[in-house]
Every structure is written in C-alpha cells, then in structure tokens.
Amino acid sequence: MEAGSLAQYKLPISSVQLPNLEEIMKKLEKSKLTAHKTVQISGSKSISNRLLILESLFKNIKIGNLSNSQDTQLLKKALSENTETVDIHHAGTAMRFLTSYYSIFEGKTTILTGSKRMKERPIKNLVTALQNLGVEIEYLENEGFPPLKITGKKITQKAVDVPANISSQFITSLLLIAGRLENGLEINLVGEVTSRSYIEMTLDILTKFGIKNSFEGNTIKVEPFEINDETPVVHYEVESDWSSASYFYSIAALGRQTIHLKSFYKESTQGDSAIAKIYADFFGITTTFTEEDHKLTLQPNPDFQFPEKIVLDMNNCPDIAQTLCVTASALKIPFDISGLGTLRVKETDRLQALYNELKKLGTETEITDLTIKSVSFNEPEENIIIKTYQDHRMAMSFAPFCLIKELNIEDEDVVEKSYPMFWEDLSDILI
C-alpha cells in the first residue's frame, strides 16, 4: 500500500481533504502516548548515503539495514544508472555527494540536476574546491547553483582549502572520493568548523574500511586506498537514524510515557545522537541502552523540574533544532538556540519556517541568520494548519504537538524523503 493511504493507518491519525486546499492534509487528533511501545526505525540516511558512494567506488562493502528514505533510494538509483543526465529531485545529500563522485571519472560528462528548490540551494563552495583540484565544472543556469555540467578529470593535486563554516556535506563529499585519488587528499578548513560531528562520522566510516585518515586542528588528511583481490569485504550494518529518533524524544517529553527504539548503538558516531543528552538535561528524558538487542529506552523522570530557560548552541546538531523548538513551545519553556547558520539553506529556510509555524502554536520568536529565541507564549490557534514548505523535518518535528492539541500537517507525503513509515509508526504509539 502506498504511503499516505488511509487504510494503513490507525486512529487517531487520518487523512482528510480540508476545504479550499489542494493538498491532502494529515489530521492529527489530540492524542495520548501509549506506554512501552517499541519502534523500529530504518537505517540512518546519513550513514547509508556515505556507504553507497564508498560501495560504488571501492566494491568491498556489503551494506545491511540500508535506509528506506527517498533520498537514499534516489542516490542508489543514480549510482546504478549510466546516463548522462542525473536528476536527484529534492535529495540534497545526493546532489553534494554525486558532484564529487562524478568529478573523478576521467572524460565522463554528467549533467547533475534536481528540483526547483534544489536549483536554489548553493553549491559554489564545493564546486570551487573541485575546480581548484582541476575538475571541469560548469553552471548551466545560475552561478553557484545546480544544475551542473561535470567533466571528470584525473585528480593529482593533493591539497585544497575549504571554508570551515559551510555544510559538512560539502566536506564529506570530498572525503568520500579522497581514497580514490592518486595522492589522497588534504583538506585545510579555513575558519570555525560547522557540524564537526558529521565530518568525524565520515572519517570513522573510512577507518572501518581501512582508509587511513587524520583530523588534527583544522587539517584533514586521507591517504590513497587501493583495492585488490586480497582486500577483505567489509560488512556494515547501518545504525538506525538518530535524526528520526529525535521526534520520539519529543513525543516522550510531551506524553511522559516510556518509548523503546531499535536499532541503536551506545557509542554512536551520528551527530544527532546529542538528542539524548539534550532531552535529559532540558526535558527529563533518561536514555538507557540494551546492548544485546541494540535497543534504547526513553524514560521520562516524573520528578524532573523543567528549566526556566533553554540556552543551547546546536552548531554540531542543527537538524534537530526544529524538534527542540516545538517541544519547548509545547511546554512553554523559553529558549535561545544558536549555531543554526546552515538552516537557511536546507530543504527550506528552516529558521523562517519555524518563525512562521511556531506562531500557530502560540510561540512568538525572533530569528537571525544564526539563532532563534522565544519572545512570548500565547494560546495556540484554534484550527492549526502547519505548512511544511516541502521539508520533511517540518512535518515530523511539529507532529508531536498533537499530544497538546489537534492539528493538521500539509503535504503529508513529504516525510518520504527521510522516514517513509513515520505516520504509521506514530499511529502505533498513540491512542
């Protein structure tokens, strides 16, 4: 049955056509959380996408628990096809990773394009780095943005400077091809590093496959890596996605019941695993791990005293900022969140989207290019309709508010980008 079909969902979640709107809305009735439900989340999109590039380049990788997200499936499809034009639609990770990937195939020309929104997302810093390494890349429409015409080259230059405050996916894109380069690669990060944890996750994956690397100060070095008949095959079981887990932390914080999630690792390399400490510190959600079945348990502390204010730098985990803002808004806890510079250039301008949609929950905010903070809390609107702006995280981060008040989410199928089973899993734990 296709995602979004009413028959596959239980009450209290249903799909209804709201008046005067073209999209099918997801109506979330005011609900309660059922205690001790278990949710199995598919493999991390971030890890899966890295592994797919490495699998294609090095051939000695076998992947288990691959993400079922739309982004991962689009990347997998692109890597399996031998076409001159590759359309990755909304998949931003695929756009960035494939830009470097197609750059190293000598003489091969590839047109890399995407959706209207993708053509508005900047890629200049990555393209400039590749051009400085000798790759031929042209902008086919607007300078600094997709679509791109990439003509692969043999890269022999060893070092390149890259701004440190850009998306970590730009840096990861270069790291994933580094082992295939004749002389490896040295990346000198200029300035303060953004989302360092995601870079470290990439380097950890490279290490697991025998690709030697180091990250000292602001310099990353990756040595060349050759595959031969004696190179062992590495099996990699992808950990479940911590970004997806964040929504259940929000649900536990609002519903004050225990939730179990599988399959997660205590020593995770995913940056968004920071959600465990954040929700322990500010919302009283204790996380415990069961090693034998890789299960984590989210347990609310009934005696927890909520803070007077949340002040937090989320530079290393900006993708969970939306979830945190909704949770704090629902509990009317003032917040001042910084380190959010990358949110302006995600699937939508997430800071502006939060500013717009939190108003509907009764939260007035102030935003800058790097921050969002609450100003006041008022009563929520009577008929809440949350716009998603074609952003999967807007849909899922606002959904837990149904534990406070009924609301509607526009464009329900947007969750397929990262978590196709989200509505079904949500329905299973609510009454």
Image (cartoon, helix red, strand yellow):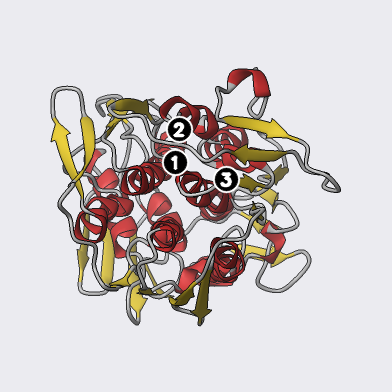
User: Where residue 123 appears, x then y in whole percent?
Assistant: 59, 66
What amino acid does circle 1 point to? Lys
What amino acid does circle 3 point to? Glu
Describe residue 380's horizontal placement relative to residue 163 as left or right: right
Depth check, mark 3 against mark 1: the one in front is 3
Residue at image coords 41%, 75%:
165
Residue at image coords 54%, 70%:
351
Residue at disc 3, secondary structure: loop
Q: Which residue is mark 1?
A: 45
User: Where residue 143 appears, x then y in whole percent?
Assistant: 71, 74
Residue at disc 1, secondary structure: helix
Q: Which residue is mark 2?
A: 67
User: Where residue 94 appears, x then y in whole percent?
Assistant: 55, 48
Of the numbered discs in the image, which one, if any, rests on residue 72?
A: none
Sequence-earlier tag: 2 or 1: 1
Query: Which of the 4 quarters of the picture holds residue 344?
Result: bottom right
In space, the residues marked 3 and 2 are separated at their CA atoms by: 30 Å
What amino acid does circle 2 point to? Ser
Of the numbered discs in the image, which one, if any, rests on residue 406?
A: 3
Using the image, determine if residue 108 lies above or below residue 24: below
